[in-house]
Structure formats: structure tokens, C-alpha cells
Amino acid sequence: MSRDTAIRGGILVTDKERRRADILCHDGRIAAIGADIDIPAAATVIDAGGCFVMPGGIDPHTHLELPMAGTRVADDFLSGTRAAVAGGTTTILDFVGPARGEPPLDALAAWREKAARSVIDYGFHMTVSWWGDLFERQMTTLVRDEGVTSFKFFLAYKGGLMLPDADILAAFERCRDLGALAQMHAENGEIIAFLQEKLRTKGILEPRGHVLSRPPYAEEEASVRAIALAEAAGVPLYIVHVSTAGAADAIARAQSRKARVFGETLPGFLSIDDRVYGSPDFDMAAGHVMSPPFRPAEHQRALWRAIEDGVLSVTATDHCCFTREQKRLGREDFTLIPNGCGGVGDRMEILWELGVASGRLTPEQFVALTSANAARIFNLWPAKGCLAVGADADIAILDPARGRTIRAADQIQNTDFSIWEGRRVSASIVHTLSRGRHLWADGELRADPGHGRYVARRPYGPAYGVNPHTGL
């Protein structure tokens, strides 16, 4: 069997340019790019005529096989990564979630075992779910030996994942010293807990209580505080799933004073608004429960401006999906609804529709938002996120004239609900290659368990070679 695959007739798009060229993939990497490259007779040839050929998507924010709210998310690493590859995503960064008091190295070993069935490449962030001497000591091994170089913190979930500011500062300093990137879920947990109790006392137990208990100002305050904590500790900061104008403004102000702060948003926050929580259909309202929640439409306009200005530089999914039955665990109390929505298989096509097809984004900006920027920020570049000789042959081919309607009944992710139900997109991912393997072929899924490999990432900072693309 030939190890060569050629892609002919397409328009190559990177975050810097687009041009007509062919690609030859050999032994998992890009071997040649050009208009007249030699293609071995035994090579498999993919006709990309009329299509855009782009780096495979990088989704830096997924939750697969995660225990939550007395259940477990619906997607494991097999179903979740199959959905991803069918949607043009070839690398994910998932979150290892230690139980309170659990050694993080033990949790990493458990997640490595879970991820062994992944069909695409994967790396890990580590959730700092508790803080103490053992966690601090094991961070050294995580960063230097295991290639886990990003750590996630929470200002939300009082009584659970939320850490006090003093612990966050201590952990931020440890990240700084090790050359690790700090990430933050920025919502004020005290405000949320206070409002949740008030709403329940008033008898507001339906899903609309979720959005009422997590107002925009709770995210805005936490974003400002997270940035201040990071600046005090001297650590770079990446704020996940930004959903409000105020949070985006806080990031913009920090960037204007040269603070090393990055912002991520989700396609859903660019298109879906908080009216979904007023649906009389419990399954519809609960199906959109995630944290932070969907916001009023004026926040969408602010997020688009932040993307255009480069303030928000990455799109992810926060893929954390549940079935309708799982969401019904909170039928009598909105605080018991498992938080999370799916979308790892839809992100590329949805963002193309919202951004490129609408005229808001160029194809080059699309590539930056879906792969290149994440590759740079998370030290996956240049193996990932680019089309260059020597890079991994992670490639997505998008047909701008092949439309489809998104239906939960057709999706590969393991749930019976979609936040994009009935949404028409004008373009589709028709082929996906992961390290040269043709895993998604015009509607045929060829993704075998275990094809994905673990991607260890190098630390940041002068001791390890400053990343010229981010300054980290």
C-alpha cells in the first residue's frame, strides 16, 4: 500500500495567503507543495477542484469522557474524535480533571488510557482542581517530562473547582517558573452562588434560572480579576470561552498595555442568543445550558468586533455534550442540569458560514481562527496549523458549494441534541487527512481507533526558546 497521497486542483489557504497548488503527503508529513510537483504513480490522488485546502482544524477546548453532575459526558475519545475528523478537525486539546486531592500525574495516566482510542492527534491541559504541595511538585514533571504545558483555573463553581485568589496566585507563579501557560474560566463564583440561591428561593427552577444566575457582569468582573492576578504573577494568560462584550473589552485593554493575554470564543456565542432559555420546551432550553451561557444579541456584535480587531484570536467548541435524558437530571432544579453543549464536528462549517460566507472573514482569517493561532499559542507550531513542507499532513478540504442542513439525527457525536439543529450551511468539509491518513472521504468515515497520537508540547519562555509567533 502506498504511503503517498496527493491533493490536486485545490486552492491552498493558510493564515497568510491563498494560492493554487497541489500537495504531496508522504509518511505522515507534507513532502511537496507546488503547481507542478511530481506525484508517484502509486499515490492516492484526491481531486480538490473547486475546493479550499486548509490546515486541519485545532480545537483547543474539548471535554471527552469527563465525569460531571452525577453522570459522564456523552462522547468518549472515540466518538468525539470521529465527529471531529468528519468536521475537519485533526487535533484536539482536552482537559485532564483530577478529583479533589487526586495526584495530577495519576489523573493524567487515566486520561492517557481513555484517549488511546482517539482517531486524531491529541494533547492535554491540566485542570488545577485543588492546590497543595503535591500538586505544585508534580507540575514540574507534567511540564518537563509529560509535555503538559497549560493549566486551567476556575473562578467559578463555588464549593467545587473554584480556588481562592491566594491559591491562584501561588499556582500562577509556579506556571511562570516552569514556562507554562495559565488558562482561566472567568466567572465570579460567589455572585453565581448568591444568585442561584435567590432564584431557587423565589421558585425559579426552570432552565432560564441558569442564565439569570450567570449575568454578564459576573464574567466581566472575573475577567478583569484574572488578568490582574496574571499580571501580578507575571504569567501569560489565556481566557477560555469569552461570551461578553465586557470580557472582550478587558482583554483588549490588557493587550493595549502589552500584557500577555489571549482570548478564545465559541461559534455559538457568535450566533445564538439567550432567548433559547425561554423556550417552553425543557429539552430545548436545557440543551443550551452551558457555562458561561448564551448572551443577548448585542454581545455577539461586540465579539465579532473583537475578532476583527484580533483581540479574540482563537475559536474552540468547549465540546461537552449530553443527551436529552442526561439534561433531564435538572428538570426540577436548573443547578442540576449538566453544563455543556456539543459542536466539535460542526465548528469549521459553522464558522465558515458565519464568517466567510457572510463576508465578515477572509479564508485566511478563518484559518487563523480555526488552527494557526491555536497552534502558535499552544506550541504546536509548525507541525500543526500550517501547510508547509515537513509539517504534519493534517489537512481539511472544504467545498464552498456543498451545502448541508445540520441535524442531530445525522451527527456523529454521541448525543440526540444539537444547538445547530436545522441550521443550513453553504459549505462542507469533504475530505480530512490526519498525518496523511485519509480519514474522512466524501462522507465515508475511515477513522480507526488508535490512529491518534499523543502530542507533548514544549514549555514557554527564554529557557526553552521564546516562541517568535507569540512572544511567550
Image (cartoon, helix red, strand yellow):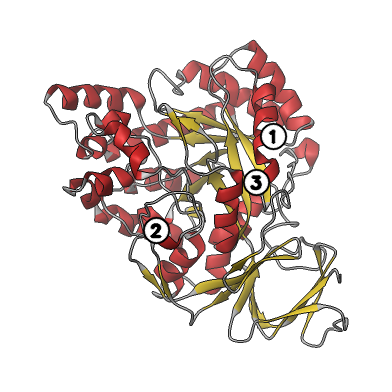
- Which numbered tag is attached to residue 408? 2
* Residue at horizontal 56 percent and vertical 16 percent from the top: 131
Q: Is residue 270 among what the camera can see?
A: yes
Image quadrant in which you'd find residue 133: top right
Give amino acid for label 1. Glu
Return the disc, 1 or 2, that comes first in the chain's sequence: 1
CA distance for labels 1 and 3: 22 Å
Q: Which residue lies furthest to the left in this view?
A: 202
Q: Residue 113 carries which label?
A: 1
Which amino acid type is shown beneath numbered disc 3? Phe
Q: Of residues 387 and 407, which is closer to you in this image?
A: 407
- Pointer 3 local density, CA inside 10 Å: few below 14, some 14–19, many at least 20: many
The local secondary structure at tag 3 comes to: loop
Question: Which-is-in-front pick, marks 1 and 3?
Answer: 1
Disc 3 and disc 2 in contact, CB within 8 angstroms: no
The residue under label 3 is 378
